Image: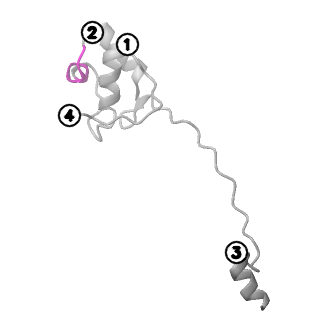
Amino acid sequence: MQPAAQAATSGVSDRPSRTLAPLRVMRPIRINRCICSRVLFSDLKEDAAAHGVDTLEALQAVREFGVNCRRCHPYVRRMLQDGTTEFNEILQDER
């Protein structure tokens, strides 16, 4: 049997093996602000407490945020529910 045929039948190749690049370690995501308005959720939490508001719409009447891409809306709603101001997960708007 010729070497190439032998390699094909034995599962071994005569090609040089590839070295895989090391996996990149991903840093955890940290979502803590409205990106468009550059307003921290912690600042929005303070505003909500100071003005006694408990809905996103009422908070927007107090402070401008979340009017462009609106990606912060689910985070602000969660913040208003449980006080969380920093998130490590992607939230989807349920509305």
Residue name at image x 24 percent, y 33 percent: 94
- 4 or 2: mark nearer the eye: 4
Residue 95 picture location, percent across and down: 20, 34
Q: Identify the secondary structure beneath mark 4.
A: loop
Query: Is disc 3 in contact with disc 2, using a CB cutoff of under 8 Å?
Result: no
Residue name at image x 25 percent, y 20 percent: 59
Q: Which mark is residue 46?
A: 1
Part of the protein shown in magenta: 54-60
Question: What residue does disc 2 label?
Answer: 51
Identify whether 18 is placed above or below 73: below
Q: Distance between the residues labelled 3 and 2?
A: 71 Å
What secondary structure predominates along the stretch shown in magenta?
A: helix
First of labels 3, 2 by sequence position: 3
Residue 92, magenta (yes or no): no
Q: Identify the secondary structure beneath mark 3.
A: loop
Identify whether 15 is placed above or below 94: below
Q: Which amino acid does label 1 sit on?
A: Glu
Query: Is disc 3 in contact with disc 4, using a CB cutoff of under 8 Å?
Result: no
Q: What residue type is labelled 2?
A: His
Question: What residue does disc 4 label?
Answer: 95
Q: Identify the secondary structure beneath mark 2.
A: helix
- 3 or 2: mark nearer the eye: 3
